[in-house]
Image (cartoon, grey):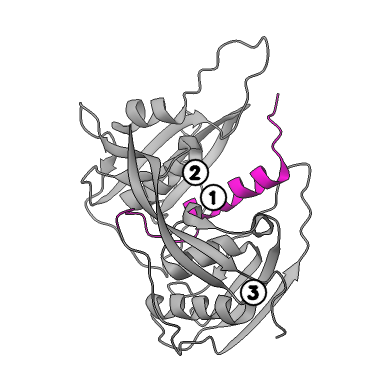
Amino acid sequence: MTLKLSFEKETALAIARILAVAIPVILGVTAAPVLRAQSAEKFEVASVRRVEIPATDRGVPVFLPTGGIGTSDPGRITYHATWLIPLIAEAFGVRSDQVTGPAWLTRERYDIVANIPMAATKDQFNLMLGNLLIDRFRLRFHMDSTIRPIYMLRVGKNGPKVKQIKHSADDPTAAPGRIGALDPQGCPVLPPARQGIVGLGTGPGEMCWTGQAVPMADIVRFIEGEGAGRPIVDETGLTGRYDFKIHLQTVNRAPTPGAAPDPAPTVFNSVEEQLGLKLESATHSFPQLIIDSIEREPTEN
């Protein structure tokens, strides 16, 4: 049977998965958050409005941002039905689970469209995003720290099983191509120019994922999103790009009563047996961004 989550928990999971896949964040938990005085960096034009996106029988709809720096449309970015937590995390250089604020942040969603000045850098974009949050939502916050349980990702005793590629055509204009046939395990076969991680269901509650030309930072985010349950610090020392395949249970899946044992391994077994890596429990001091005040309704456009 399917495990039913509360709306707040399901939304929090959706936010976490967005950050695991779509929005770059600082992964080294020892890195200091970006603390700065409000600068003059601003979007040329920005439209912000609150929207209602009801949950469906398939869960909470999630929409990835389009455009922005590093894409084919660097002068304009569009967030459809986004939560504010991922944007706060991106703007101020912390992880989403390092942001503490009012409960409505996991429920309310917003459409944001912004024009980015020509030749703006990613750091400048983050300043613009932070200023938008400060100006339009009256965001005020302070920083603190907390000790939290984490996992250290290290190379297993028999060495990594991810395959390092010798070179990567990191050309954003290259056509990614369509996903091809399935391999004998049911994992998608990706075209040569495709980079990233793609998964397909292989049975009830099971997924097979193919990664191609993937840096370790993205592999770490993927493992976090697939049910590790804690932040992960990369201590593998692996610095290249890697190909891999991994078969595992889907996140938050409950076993069917009376069913035969499931062959799909958990993320912990999969990481060790299929990727040659291991997750080891530890604790670490995290910076925490604590919101003092924030308005639910943005100021008028």
Is residue 58 in sight in this rendering? yes
Q: Nearer the viewer, residue 24 or 42?
A: 42
Cα gap from disc 1 to disc 3, whole angstroms: 19 Å
Residue 112 is tagged as 3
Q: Is residue 23 magenta?
A: yes
Amino acid carrying mark 3 in the image: Ile
- The magenta region covers 1-30
Return the mark for residue 225. Answer: 2
Judge left or right: residue 45 versus residue 81. left
Contact (CB < 8 A) between labels 2 and 3?
A: no
At x 36%, y 67%, the residue is 171
Q: Which residue is mark 1?
A: 16
Q: Is residue 287 left or right of residue 59?
A: left
Q: As rendered, which of 128 and 248 lies closer to the eye?
A: 128
Q: In the rendered structure, which disc, 1 or 3, sits on the residue that comes first in sequence?
A: 1
Q: Residue at x 41, y 44 (%)?
A: 231
